Image (spheres, helix red, strand yellow):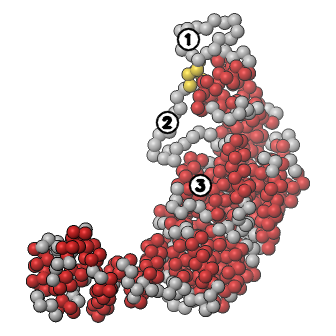
Amino acid sequence: MDQLGYELEKIDGGLSDLLLALSVGFDLAGQMPPALDQAAESLDHLVTRARAAGLLRADGRLVPLVRQAVLAATPPYRVREAQRALVDAFTAEGRSLGDVARGLARGGLRDPRIARALEREGDNVLAERPALASALYDEAGAAGSDELTTAARRAQAASAVGDLDGAGRILDNLLSSEGAPDLLRGVDVAAATWAQRGMLVRSAEVYRWLGADRTGPSASLAAVAMIGIGDREGAETMLKAPGPSGSPTLAAVAVGLMGEGISASIAAQPTHALPALIRASDMMTASGSSIPLPEVPAALAALVALHSGEPAVADSVLDDALAGEQAGPAARPRLLLLRAWTAMQLDRPDRARAAITEAGACEGGLAPRDELLFDALEVGLARRTDDTAALVHAWQRARERILHVSVDLYSLLPFGELAVAAARLRDSARLEPQLAEAWALLERLGDPPLWSIPLRWHAVQAAILAERPSDLAPHASALVRASGNNHLASVLAAAGRSWVAVLAGHIDVDAVEAAARGLAAVGMTWDGSRLAGHAAPRADERKDMARLLACARDLHPGSVVSVSAETEPVPTLPAVRTTVRPSAGQPADAGSEGAVLSPREREVARLVLEGKTYREIGAAIFISPRTAEHHIARIRRRLGAATRSELLAQLRLSLGEEASGPP
């Protein structure tokens, strides 16, 4: 490079001017700087000399190494003169500076024309490519643009790629400035950022600060935030404000439908909520925009579907939104976690795990709001697989997580799941403040059935697990009262009655089976199978026990199915061969090939190693305690184990890495 620079210093003025012009971005096919028109040699002759010297490629562009050497060897003031001449030429011809502007800004040129060009480029890609927009705004700042002027847009770009801290710092400066430019956009970004942090109450506050008269097209977003924290009157005030004039865009239509849908969801008859929110999701996906939102339309639609007992609808909405990359990369983790939640409800744990893994791998990580959902999913999956060790571990993480977020309408499902787990682990006191906040929120909204019924069902389950009938009564009564006008409430009320009867020892087989299948029909397959499986060993007649066990197995077969099970066969697990240890006084048979445990016996053996009792084993795999006892006796005979400690040792050796849990 040094030698090349030394050689370039020997070049005469005309050729030197040509090389400098090409180095800063001039093109032989366009206008060249005036200095070359006044050169002693014609442009064609200069180009011929440059090619002959190996400085130009055949297409008329400089060899990259030559360009670097020219810029390094030329005094900075001459480089800046040439760069400004380039901007003058583009401006005179009415040409877009485009990529030339980026190169000039990176090269250190400060020029308002460059700054404006980069701002325009950033605006053009902000909705669809926020990461690129962020880079363009930074380059515009380097070229001399006013940072306060672009603050709202820079914050939007940062928020859209998941940089909540960066967006927050920009917004602090913007919203504290008197006469802040682009204020509505800044407020929308602030509201979206607070919502992702799990502090929706701050989202509502920033819209209140702005005022209904200034929300304009964001009135529906303000309503989503306010209804989410229980401020029904505030939401109504926002929605009554005059709407924007002009033809609405796809994104604007989606936002308007969000307001309509979420308002309908808190009505006594919320029949219009789900259709409006599904249309909002469709329109937002079609728009291709990643505008700042307190909640994504697909997420709202999925939450309303889940609260309505329609997990399959939620799954379909989420699949469409994910396929269409709704609301950009920042929304993807939340949509994936909600997909995992629907899969968990639909008793598809492998699909749930796959979605959780994909969400955790998303660039930018999880926002605090989504970390709560992630932890609640881990708790829910552990509870549904009776994995006590995993449940304890997941609960320990979740109980710390809840300290970082506040309760809102859109987080009731994870808090409900955590309430049941806390009751099972005898740790309900930790969640009492959050649950009290949830009930107060629902009361402020008039106890809307769509949102309150699933939480009441969680409260019923928690009361049963905690053996606190006084806590159960008000929620069971509320479900019964709502059952006349709400199908999900009627199903849950029937299931609640069956659970209470089963625990009291009164088994009505027809009622239990109907309740279990009713739960499955509203997307609570695991709950239904659990009810039938719990009732089975308490039935008086053997035929009733068999019938309930068959119902439990039918609803929850317990088979492990891969995510691609629709297109690929499910492989069967090979039989485990075990070495038989001779019992006392019995010689070992050197030619023995060992005992083979059946798949069911392996399943029982794993539960034995986890320390389960006969009753717990039966409940886990839907067999009676007596059948579990027979399985264990048969396993002991096959392994030749004379004592329990011998049996456990043999099982650990036999199952190897499949065995887990405490002895």
Pointer 2: what residue? Answer: 571
Name which of mark 3 and mark 1 comes first in the sequence: 3
State whether residue 197 appears in this view.
yes
Q: From the viewer's perspective, tell me whether residue 279 is left or right of residue 639.
A: left
Pointer 3: what residue? Answer: 340
Residue 493 place in picture, x, y as percent:
79, 55
Asked which secondary structure carries label 3, the reply is: helix
- Using the numbered discs, state the Cα–Cα distance from disc 3 to disc 1 in whole angstroms: 47 Å
Name which of mark 3 and mark 2 comes first in the sequence: 3
Which corner quadrant holds the C terminus? top right
Name the one closer to the observer, 383 or 395: 395
Which corner quadrant holds the N terminus? bottom left
Pointer 1: what residue? Answer: 592
Callout in the foreground (3, 2): 3
Q: Callout 2 environment at 10 Å: few (<14), some (14 to 19), or many (20+)?
A: few
Q: From the viewer's perspective, tell me whether residue 511 is left or right of residue 9.
A: right
Asked which secondary structure carries label 1, the reply is: loop
